[in-house]
Image (cartoon, grey):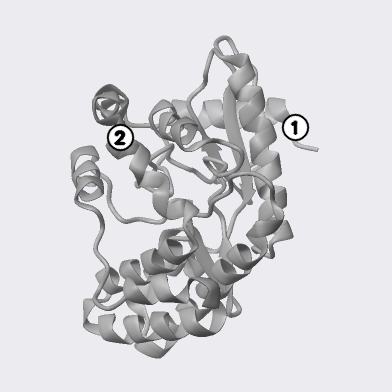
Amino acid sequence: MTDLAALAETIRRHEAAQGQPISRLGYFCAPFRPGEGPFSDRVIKVYRGLRDDAALDRLAAAHDDYVAALRETGVPLPETAFHLLEGDGPRVPVIVQEALPETALMRPRMQAEGLESTLEMMEAAGQVIARFWNAADRFETRIGFHPSIRNFAVLDGQAVFYDTFPPLIHYSREEMGRMLLLFSDKRLMRLIGPLMRARVTGIQDEWYSAPETLVGLVGSACRLRPKHAQAYLDWGRDFAERAMPRWAEEAVAGMQAAPRLPGYWTGFRKLLGLQGEPNL
């Protein structure tokens, strides 16, 4: 069982020392790994606190359900725990997750390794995507998946997924759109986001579409290694036919050329100063 007092002290020391996060992307937070102490083998993700206790309790329950659903569908996931830390102010959501070797993170590996190796990693990640969607019908609730390259590590040929926030289960499209604003770590997004609520809400749509998650993975690879784009497109079309036949027609249609990010999302990224770093 997690020592919550020790966890709170670890977070307090990190904030006091203004330690460096291990990822700068952090749309929702900047994860960190303590250099010493009882959580030195863990990545800690601290989110914005809320004064709405009912919403926080619902979030905690949804996260537990989502982790269970990911495991049930065969998605490899590090040991992951969700906590609501008590303090002087509102309760604060915190995720504590088993740390993965930085040398296994898929995004930097995709940038540095040869074509054959990157295709092997794409296959490993694709198999996780296919397993999830081929099994997702068993859940009688709205459920999604965000399998971007930056949310995977590849260990011994197996892709491991590690992004469980926000928990993409139970929430309606409108509720998830509000959550994207409510929990954003970027104050600017919380200020201007409500003015563009429809576009912010649309960010999530890919996560709830089986073919679009595959197309999104291929699009990311094409942007990372444009000189290999044709090889990734060829792989993606073949993979859709053999591993995701129910969605192959739509997925293949989306991979006739290198997929591009929606203009509104690239605009948000530039506005918020987000870079394509691993979002541990």
Say few, some or many: other residues with alpha carbon within 10 Å of mark 2 (under 14 / 14 to 19 / 20 or more): few
At horizontal 41% and vertical 90% (from top left) the residue drawn is 116
- Report x, y in % for residue 255: 32, 75
Helix, strand or loop at mark 2 = helix
How far apart in space, not on screen, are marks 1 and 2 (Cα)? Answer: 41 Å
Q: Which x, y percent locates residue 167? A: 57, 42
Side of 95 relative to 208 (left or right)? right
Quadrant assignment, res 185: top left
- The kind of residue on which mark 2 rests is Ala
Reading the image, the residue beneath label 2 is: 198
Q: Residue furthest top?
A: 88
Q: Is residue 7 visible?
A: no
Q: Which mark is residue 3?
A: 1
Q: Quadrant of residue 118?
A: bottom left
Q: Earlier in the sequence, mark 1 or mark 2?
A: 1
Q: Quadrant of residue 60?
A: top right
Look at discs 1 and 2 and give the one toward the viewer: 2
Name the residue at 48% across, 25% down: 48
